[in-house]
Image: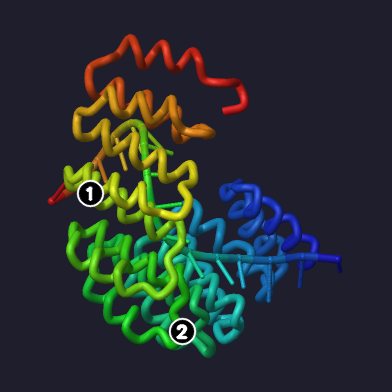
Amino acid sequence: VVSWTAIIAGYAREGHGEEALTLFYRMQETGVQPNQFTFSSVLPACADLAALEHGKKAHEGIIRSGFQYDAFVERALVDMYVKCGSMEDGGNVFARMSERSVLSWTAMIAGYAQNELVDEALKLFQKIPERDVVAWNAMIAGYAQNGHVDEALKLFQKTPELDVVSFNAMIAIYTQNGRIDEAMKFFQKMPEQNVASWNAIITGCAQNRRVDEARKHFQEMPARDVVSWNAMMAAYAQNKYVNEALHLFQKIPERN
RNA sequence: UGACUGUCUCUUGGGU
């Protein structure tokens, strides 16, 4: 079981979920019973593939074999259900967990928000015993994803410790609602911008038909990653500058 | 000898 688990874990970690699942089933066909290590290795593979049915089967196996109270397994189950978008199942496991870390709380909040259950997200957020900056950011982004701009801003203003992600989230919210100038204010007053901040601005300009400004920021930014290049190409393409998009594509450095 | 985990920015498709 150790050997099987080591290989399954390896595949899962490298993003080869299909292989991880295949091996998971094959080990059982050969009569080897998975243990808690195996389950906490294979569940992330189900999560990556958003393979809810496989995840549920694994959950049944976990209950049959009595590993449902293992803390590693519980966290992996919550993570799997959230990433598969099955918030009801995730919530059930979460509610029965022996120990809920702030990571699991945050995963649940983000999951609810991404599934348009912003009220549920808020309920959990209000119940977190210890909120860190990531949890605050998740709730801010949760409002954003559901179009609640004002609530997001209120929460941002109440956040005790802001970081670059908090600001980036606000930039995205405002640009997505056509309020570029307000987004720029956040961009300018944040202590330091990272590449995602610049990318958000570029995308924001593009979505509001300000291609020239997008290009200006693209040229100004200190460092570009693959998202930057994609964002700028999309900026051109979506505004009917197909030739410019193609031209840019040809200029992307190989490492991207 | 083996295990899991959270928040922001781009791209494609699907759904509403």
| x, y percent for residue A167 | 37, 56
| x, y percent for residue A152 | 25, 64
Q: Would residue A134 be found to the left or right of residue A62 on screen? A: left
> In the rendering, which numbered label is found on residue A201?
none
Look at 52% across and 34% down and name the residue there.
A222
Quadrant containing the N terminus of chain A is: bottom right
Q: Secondary structure at mark 1?
A: helix
Q: The residue marked by circle 2 belongs to what chain?
A: A
Quarter occupied by residue A6: bottom right
- Which sits earlier in the primary sequence, circle 2 or circle 1? 2
| Pick the front one: A85 or A108 | A108
Please check whether the numbered discs 2 and 1 fall on a single chain. yes
Q: Does A191 sit above or below residue A122?
A: above
| x, y percent for residue A108 | 39, 72
Residue at the disc numbered 2: A130
Crowd band around label 2 with a 10 angstrom C-alpha radius: few (<14), some (14–19), many (20+):
few
Residue type at mark 2 is Glu
Q: The residue marked by circle 1 belongs to what chain?
A: A
**Distance Cα–Cα, label 2 vs label 1:** 31 Å
> In the rendering, which numbered label is found on residue A182?
1
| Pick the front one: A107 or A71 | A107
